[in-house]
Amino acid sequence: MNVAAPQNTTIRTGVARVLEQKRRFLVPSVYHFYCDPPLIVRGDGCELIDSEGRRYLDLYSGVGAMSLGHSHPDVLAAAHRQIEELQHTTTIYLTPPMFDLAERLAELAPAEINRSFFCASGTEANESALLMASQFTGREQFLSLDRGLHGRTKAAMSVTQIPMWRTDPFLLNTCTRVPGYDDQSSLQSIERELRTRNYAAVIAEPIQGNGGIIMPPTGYWQTLRKLCDDTDTLLIADEVQTGINRTGTFFAVNHEHVTPDFITTAKALGNGFPIAACLTTDRIADTCKRPAAATYGANPIACAVALAVLEFHQENNLAAEAMQKGIHLEVNLQRLAQRNDIITSIRGRGLMIGVELGDGSNGAAAVITDRVLEAMKDSGFLLGKTGLGRNVVTFMPPLVITAQQLDTACEQFEQVLDSMKK
């Protein structure tokens, strides 16, 4: 990828000014990638463009949000049409896009998942699921898996089990942690807890994204569903990252033919527009009758965009595209792993792939990962990083990315990894 651009002191001064604004006016906990960060000013398909005109292949797509890429014409057209008609009301008024979207999601979700509560973020969607689970069961306790990430509000952070994201010093004591997918005792621990204490729900990601693209063993979710059924415990599938065809099917739970009691979705649903949904069954929804609203939860523009996103996904079979391109990407990465022992593991499904570098038990792997990300950025490729040790290079590109673009990224990735040996 060509990223050459003439140095421009005025532009670099602009970058320095933005960094100074960040230092002075933002809360310090809002951090950014890279020692020498680009100033992103525009998006075009699968690429981002910085203030110097440099183009970057976006292989992280806003943590999986931009499934159709940047400035997609269908997304822009839907937003333009809607903003000219109606920009905003709230859920206290009837507006067609909200109900059309709820109906469409009911058609696409697993059987029995028919009801939606709309909000603006994945965190809110998970918070809504936790609330409805307590309302339905009359219980306040929850189980969550080690390495799970579910949000930054009080309850969502309390069920999060990644230390760096548990920043609240006074987390709720209504959540019990159990071993995650990478521990053989996980299901036994869940069964022991569910049979000795009354829990409202178990919350889990079908693939743990920020935990390092951690996959459940085959059959895990089927066993988990049975354990929940046997103990009258609800099951919440956090599909904020895995949903909307990211893993090769509309929701990742479909891979194991499991219907949870709740599915939460966000990110790719709006392709960058803030919209999220907590989906549940008629049986649970019918008990949730106390007033609830979200000012921006069903914003007409966001709903119209979501409908356009879902239509494009269906018409272009992006589920199959994600699966096929994901296999193509993984084959390329496995080839790299065979000749580069810095790669210790490759895992994922569809276009949600993690490449673990080194041993995450010490800080050295995280340093190497940062060096790899910096070098890839300097070459025109933006990647993510996840994992408890922040040493898992993460590929979550737009689903419309081409095989050729993936090949180019892998070629550069190989060169960067080779340079780490020198």
Image (spheres, rainbow, N blue to C red):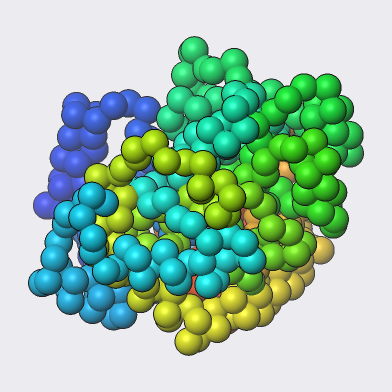
- Name the residue: 17% across, 76% down: 81
Residue 137 in the image: above or below residue 265: above
Residue 7 coordinates in the image, percent (x, y): 22, 59
Check the image and report above or below for 158 versus 150: above
| Residue in front for this viewpoint, 60 or 277 | 277
* Residue at left offset 17%, top offset 54%: 89
Of all residues shown, which one is farthest toward the bottom? 315
Q: Is residue 414 visible?
A: no
Give the tally of numbered discs: 0
Q: Residue 402 appears at what percent x and percent y?
A: 52, 81
Say above or below: 366 vs 226.
above
Image check: 394 left or right of 87?
right
| Residue pictured at 50% horizontal, 81% vertical | 314
**Residue 54 versus residue 29: which sits nearer the camera?**
29
Give me the residue at 83% from left, 22% from top.
196
Q: Is residue 337 left or right of residue 253?
A: right
Answer left or right for 223 relative to 327: right
Q: Quadrant of the N terminus?
A: bottom left
Left or right side of 176 for 126: left
Residue 252 sits in quarter: bottom right
Q: Position of residue 244 (x, y in %)?
A: 52, 66
Q: Nearer the viewer, residue 338 or 277?
A: 277
On the image, the x and y values in percent for residue 84 come to 10, 72
385 up-or-down from 86: above or below? above
- Which is more toward the observer, 342 or 305? 305
Q: Is residue 195 visible?
A: yes
Would you identify the image quadrant in which residue 361 lies?
top right
